[in-house]
Amino acid sequence: MTKRTFHVWRGGGEGGLAQYEVEVNEGEVVLDVLHRLQATQCPDLAVRWNCKAGKCGSCSVEINGRPRLACMARMSTFEPEESITVTPMRTFPVIRDLVCDVSFNYQKAREIPSFTPSPDSEPGDFRMQQEDVQRMQEFRKCIECFLCQDVCHVIRDHEENKEAFAGPRFLMRAAELEMHPEDTADRRKISQEEFGLGYCNITKCCTEVCPEQIHITDNALIPLKERVADRQYDPLVWLGSKIGLRKGADTPVPPNTRKRTSSPEQ
Amino acid sequence: MTSTLPPPERAGLKRPRISARTLRTDRWWTPPLWTVLGLTAFLVYGLVRVLQQDHYWVADYGYLTPFYSPCLSASCAPGSAHLGTLPWEFPWFLPYALFSLPFLLLFRFTCYYYRKAYYRSFWQAPTACAVREPHGRYTGESRFPMIGQNLHRYFFYAAALIAVINTYDAALALFHGREGGFGIGLGNLILIGNVVLLWVYTLSCHSCRHVFGGRLNSFSGRPVRYWMWTQISRMNSRHMLWAWVTLGTLVIADLYVALVASGTITDPRIYN
Amino acid sequence: MSETTRHSYDVVVIGAGGAGLRAAIEARQQGKKTAVISKSLFGKAHTVMAEGGAAAALGNVNSSDQWQVHFRDTIRGGKFMNNPRMAELHAKEAPQRILELEYWGALFDRTPDGRISQRNFGGHEYPRLAHVGDRTGLEMIRTLQQRVVQLQQADAAEFGDPEAMLRVFPETTVTELLLDGEPGAEGSRVSGAFAYIRETGDFLVFEAPAVILATGGIGRSFKVTSNSWEYTGDGHALALRAGATLLNMEFVQFHPTGMVWPPSVKGILVTESVRGDGGVLRNSEGRRFMFDYVPDVFRDQYAETEEEADGWYADPANHRRPPELLPRDEVARAINNEVKQGRGSPHGGVFLDVSTRLPAEEIMRRLPSMYHQFKELADVDITAGPMEVGPTCHYVMGGVEVDADTGASVVPGLFAAGEVAGGMHGSNRLGGNSLSDLLVFGRRSGLGAASYLDGLGEDRPGIDDAAVERLRAEAAAPFERETGENPYQLQQEIQQTMNDLVGIIRRGSEIEQALESLDKLRERVAGVRAEGDTIYNPGWHLTLDLRNMLLVSEAVARAALMREESRGGHTRDDFPAMSAEWRRVNLVASLREGGIRLRRRPLDPLRPDLMELFDREELGKYLTEEEMPPAPRSGGSETAKEDK
Ligand SMILES: Cc1cc2nc3c(=O)[nH]c(=O)nc-3n(C[C@H](O)[C@H](O)[C@H](O)COP(=O)(O)OP(=O)(O)OC[C@H]3O[C@@H](n4cnc5c(N)ncnc54)[C@H](O)[C@@H]3O)c2cc1C
Ligand code: SF4
Ligand code: SF4
Ligand code: FES
Ligand code: FES
């Protein structure tokens, strides 16, 4: 058992770092230490968590400046004398302490046209091989921790882009649906024009922070960019659509979904 | 945009006001620094060599540096222009490989990996993850001219064609033995090694991965394309590695040819 | 002071796990205006943690599988204490529910002919669990979440507002149900729910004639548990206080394999697939002790030698199962005993080893998240050495007493589904049966609520403003106290008490002691104090959860004290045998004058056609003489069938 120095963000957006000396035992993770702070020094310290095993994506914070899951950040990975700074995700407004308002993400999720099987099919009709679903299964490992959304400089450093950019998590969702063998919608045009795929400059920070080790950029965003290029920047397709040869239609953003998400009543 | 509604977060809440550019405590600035140094070194070397218009061809063994292939100026050394030349002699500022170099440059410029590398290091958008970038506004690749990055696949097609020519060069050099006919020297190994790695880099391209299988929604019933996609995907996961390795092999191949052509060293022969 | 806002809905679903979301989807599809309330963010409910899979007799891997076989396995697993109608509906409807999920976008692992693949699991005769690697729960909740979004998109197009008909209230906690009438009184019925928003501390009143409880379990009342902070037994307590009844709360499942070290992760689950894929249990002497613990009822289904057991993995048709795959209760008790006898591992567990059983690559492929979990959290490489594991509180079989077909509780307008509902799993739940339970009964409770509403017509219950005022004051009270204890300390004491005295092995005198301690704790909990303000204040939230934990703990302890036998998730040291007489007894808990009262109610008998799925010899181990079906005449079972 040793004492460590923690700097933890307290308060809302205008808050600041508070310093604590706190016990740390062998085998603990940062979340355990935050819980000890709650139990012994500041019972009202706000932090989200559920599973404590990296499965639910609730405990996203920034530890020494890096977006991480608090429940998977082992204390033994820090230098013995290193002090540890825990701050809320920078991209989202702070409710209090380490808890952010992540409703941005739920809003974006709602703008993406849902899975659209052929109207002639019914439950039980699908026959898909493992190789057909494997690519999408990687994306479905996503635990919606929103660390990728947090780290992406497009919105982290430019809040004004939030409206135009859905973020890696939801561009990946669009890619997933585009790859689904039984899906009939076409989200390529809106991926570029409404969800802001073009804002992504493939600098891969989303991939770097993803706790599920999903290759977001290589396997979702770049393939989606290529699909968009098929649709938008291919001279033959362009010609085809001019003379009315292209079949299928672009799926629009579902009507009336672009509005403020519900927020707790004031 | 279709909508001008305010962002969805609850009114009154603010993002954490942290003035530090980043709270990262590691040496996050080293990788972009290395990238700047590496890319600059290559560009400077390449520029010097291309403008040199000399020491690109070893007539004895048929070694042609990739920087001059295909050689198109009427002043190309005899035997070095495998595809024939244009009727003019190029002025000092035009590279002899006039048609291939611009495409190769654009291929690498629009390559998804190099984009990441120079956006991070030269453009600093962002310098490193969770480090605030210095720009006031950001639109990424959504507007002209950066939207042109979407043309990468066409440069891939061109690059594949040029890789065929490089392969032809390297193969031809095998039939320049000292006694005539087949022969192998260290130079051949270097040229072949370079060409093989160039292929690996070119085929591991994301556009290539898309064209050969990525664009399909269903792999079942298309075993050949699935196999190709799987193989390309495997190479693709190391695309960054191949991008740097081929910069290295290009320099090695060119430098070797230059040294032999200028008579600084002689080419050790292994057979004939 | 915090605000109070009113909302009016047709159906309010409390809980956004598998059961809650499936119920809400159904209610919405029936045209009812529906709200879903959840303590955590949308998509983070406990269901995300489920790993192994969802059991459904699809017959994709072994075509002999049918609902009857699934039914039989479920009843066997529950030691014949299941509500037979629920087990029947579950076995029959699970396949449709799984296919429906696929149609909403779930991507299960596939068989070579392109169907949903299924895997083996403890207690299931055939490979039956539809799965996605070891993250099936995540797939399920994400799919349901995305289905909710899909319905909202349709509503946006139709009504101009995505939340017109179906709205999610994340991070909102219900503290009490609202009633039209007095709890327990004749004619009293549900009229809504009272909640606070965790983010702001503001209060919400939901006016709704139908409320569906889908709040999950109670595991947080135990110290060593695989359950998260959410599992404070809120739904169970809400139901009790609204006058509803709880069934067989003594049945608590202890999963045999939880992590035991480091202390901070003690209790986190080690999936059963580790044993399903060849992992074996050893004590400190290196012995595979499970061979010593095969109970008589299972004697002929389990191997007696290591050779025979090892043969099963490759050739299950000609070998009996390894005893490591006995039902969870048996394995948990065995581990407990080994540790007690001093043959445990250094940190008080036993060794679970796959490293000597499978090549490293194979382990990485089949158990990726277990590898990850041990590597990250315990610094143990499971491909190189054994894990240390011990029992952990995992699931509660007991729950709100409901009607099998509609999920209706005894209080009109109150429904329950999922882990919070009782009866389906009898005294012990089979792995994989929960996820399918959520879907089957989630949907049924949604349908049940919809038809209850249709029956109501214009006769909607009203909200009692005085009650709302009282609830507001109650919720805010912890802030007003000048003195009072720290809620975290009290929570720890409840957990320690339950763990030590009403844990995996129980004894009458210890349970009495526990009841005494709980009694004392009740007074202290009544005076607990919250510090700080109302904005996202976990300390305050815990003060409000504590009384639920206490009430539910008392229900568990009282029932455990009364049931004088050992069965499934209830083991009495002083009554070690299973009793056929006790099998016929359901213990029904209700709240009277602030305390738990228990009533005995006979268990529904098995229908004769379902009874026929078992042979007489097996039935004889569970049933009393008078319950046994008439003995077949000399002609054997053929004639017995024709007799009816
Ligand atoms: C680690 C682990 C692994 C498991 N693996 C499997 C498996 O492989 N197969 C299987 O079949 N089962 C498995 N289970 C069991 C299964 O996951 C659960 O029993 C099941 O998910 C319970 O679902 P539910 O819908 O009833 O509740 P949950 O998913 O737990 O949801 C409860 C919901 O109620 C909400 N809630 C609770 N109280 C309140 C309140 N007061 N106000 C408002 N909202 C409230 C919560 O916020 C939450 O949204 C596993 C369980 C665990 C812990
Ligand atoms: S790769 Fe694209 S989406 Fe991912 S962090 Fe970088 S800019 Fe954002
Ligand atoms: S993609 Fe990865 S980082 Fe992004 S939300 Fe999902 S799990 Fe988190
Ligand atoms: S608590 Fe679930 S991911 Fe950290
Ligand atoms: S060459 Fe790098 S992605 Fe195409």
Image (tube, grey):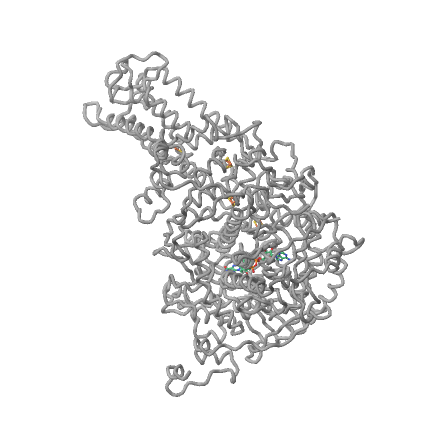
Q: Is C316 situated left or right of C342 in this image?
A: left
Q: Is residue A15 visible?
A: yes
Q: Position of residue B256 (x, y in %)?
A: 33, 23
The one nearer the camera, C530 or C84, is C84
Of all residues shown, which one is farthest toward the bottom? Answer: C634
User: In terms of depth relative to the viewer, which is nearer, A224 or C411?
Assistant: C411
Residue C581, image x, y percentages: 57, 80
In this view of the protein, can residue A81 be seen by the observer? Answer: no
Measured from the top left, where is residue C507 in percent x and y? Answer: 64, 73
Image quadrant in which you'd find residue A17:
top right
Image spot of residue A253 (x, y percent):
49, 41
Q: On screen, C321 above or below B174?
A: below
The quarter of the picture where the C terminus of chain A appears is top right
Q: Number of labelled discs?
A: 0
Q: Nearer the viewer, residue A26 or C361?
A: C361
Quarter of the image where one finds residue B213: top left
Furthest-right residue in this view: C482
